[in-house]
Amino acid sequence: MVVASRSSVSALGAAAKDISVRASNIANQRNSLPVDRVEISAAARSAAANADGDHDSIYKPGKVTYDSVEGGGVRLVVDQKSPSHQVVFNPSDPNTDEMGRVAIPNTDTINELVGVRQARTMFDANLALIRAENQMAGTLLDSMG
């Protein structure tokens, strides 16, 4: 029973972190930067930020994957989504360039919402498993007394 509990507890933590990453992706999906600000290298952006104190950057959405843990359990691995941004036409955005383009995070709202639902289902299922195990242990102890 201990291995099942350990697996379920690790899955609860992974599901909670998954929901957090996906919620952050959804909340920051309209964060934008001018296209020319996103195209420069990280080193050039860092040098420019140090020179003028400007720390603007585009939100980099996370990509979640689950990895099994030896001995039972699961952990969540969060990587940066690649490509991290997409260029869209949005002339009303204050960061638009002369051609009406702006860079925004590469986030698909539908996929993120489906992922949140899957993580919530996993959370609920593992919580039910922990409750059932707790109830079985209680029943076993009651029958011994």
Image (cartoon, rainbow, N blue to C red):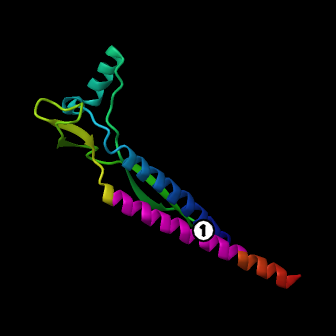
Q: Tell me: 130 left or right of 92.
A: right
Image quadrant occupied by the N terminus? bottom right
- The image quadrant of residue 125 is bottom right
**Magenta span of residues:** 111-134
Q: Residue at 50%, 60% (x, y): give it.
A: 15
Report x, y in % for residue 84. Answer: 29, 44
Magenta-colored stretch includes residue 126 = yes
Mark 1 highlights which residue? 127
Q: Residue at 31%, 20% (x, y): give it.
A: 47
Up the image or down, 45 lies above or below 118; here it is above
Tally the marks.
Answer: 1
Q: Tell me: 86 left or right of 8.
A: left
Report x, y in % for residue 118. Answer: 43, 66
In the image, 123 versus 65, the foreground residue is 123
Magenta span: predominant SS is helix
Outermost residue toward the bottom?
143
Report x, y in % for residue 3. Answer: 63, 70
Q: Residue at 23%, 35% (x, y): give it.
A: 93
Outermost residue toward the left?
99
Circle 1 residues within 10 Å: few <14, some 14–19, many ≥20: some
Of helix, strand and loop, which one carries label 1? helix
Q: Residue at 54%, 63% (x, y): give it.
A: 11
Image quadrant occupied by the C terminus? bottom right
- The image quadrant of residue 115 is bottom left
